[in-house]
Image (spheres, rainbow, N blue to C red):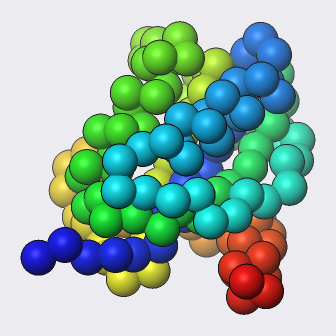
Amino acid sequence: MTVRDIAYVALGSNLGDRDVYLARARRALASMPRTRLMAASSIEETEPFGPVEQGPYLNQMVALETELSPRELLGELHRIEQAEGRVRTERWGPRTLDLDIVRYEQQTADDADLIVPHPAVNERDFWRREQAELRSLIARH
């Protein structure tokens, strides 16, 4: 059975033209199969997490109405990251584009490589602000 759900996806970039990477990511997310981009939060700059010295991130979150399961969505996110030059070499390292499933309204996942809601959902203040902004935008429509 196909479930229509709302997924919240975090976008981040701290290499190259960060605004361009976020814009291209939004376009790619909007063109995914069985998915509609409902709303996008404001963009904000944040300090990086982890032990690796690197520049600040631009972050944003989008709300997607989708029929994709968490696993299917993860595959699409990895495809988009790779298309934008993402290379997974160093954990917590700098990246052209980072796309994370923050949460789904109705679905969860608990696998070795996919946990939904994201384990850091309550540790990142900017994610809480962005989710609140998205909920407000969605409620207005």
Q: Is residue 73 left or right of residue 140?
A: left
> Whole-percent x and y of residue 54?
76, 19
Q: Is residue 81 left or right of residue 57?
A: left
Front residue of this view, candidates 125 and 103: 103
Front residue of this view, candidates 76 and 129: 76
Front residue of this view, candidates 7 and 139: 139
21 is higher (above) or lower (below) than 2: above
Front residue of this view, candidates 97 and 49: 97
- Residue at image coords 26%, 76%: 3
Q: Quadrant for the N terminus, please.
A: bottom left
Q: Is residue 100 left or right of residue 93?
A: left
- Residue at image coords 85%, 48%: 43
> Whole-percent x and y of residue 33?
35, 48
> Whole-percent x and y of residue 56?
83, 30
> Whole-percent x and y of residue 108?
30, 73
58 is higher (above) or lower (below) than 109: above
Question: In the picture, residue 122 is in which quadrant?
Answer: bottom right
Residue 51 visible? The answer is: no
Residue most toward the left?
1
107 is higher (above) or lower (below) than 85: below
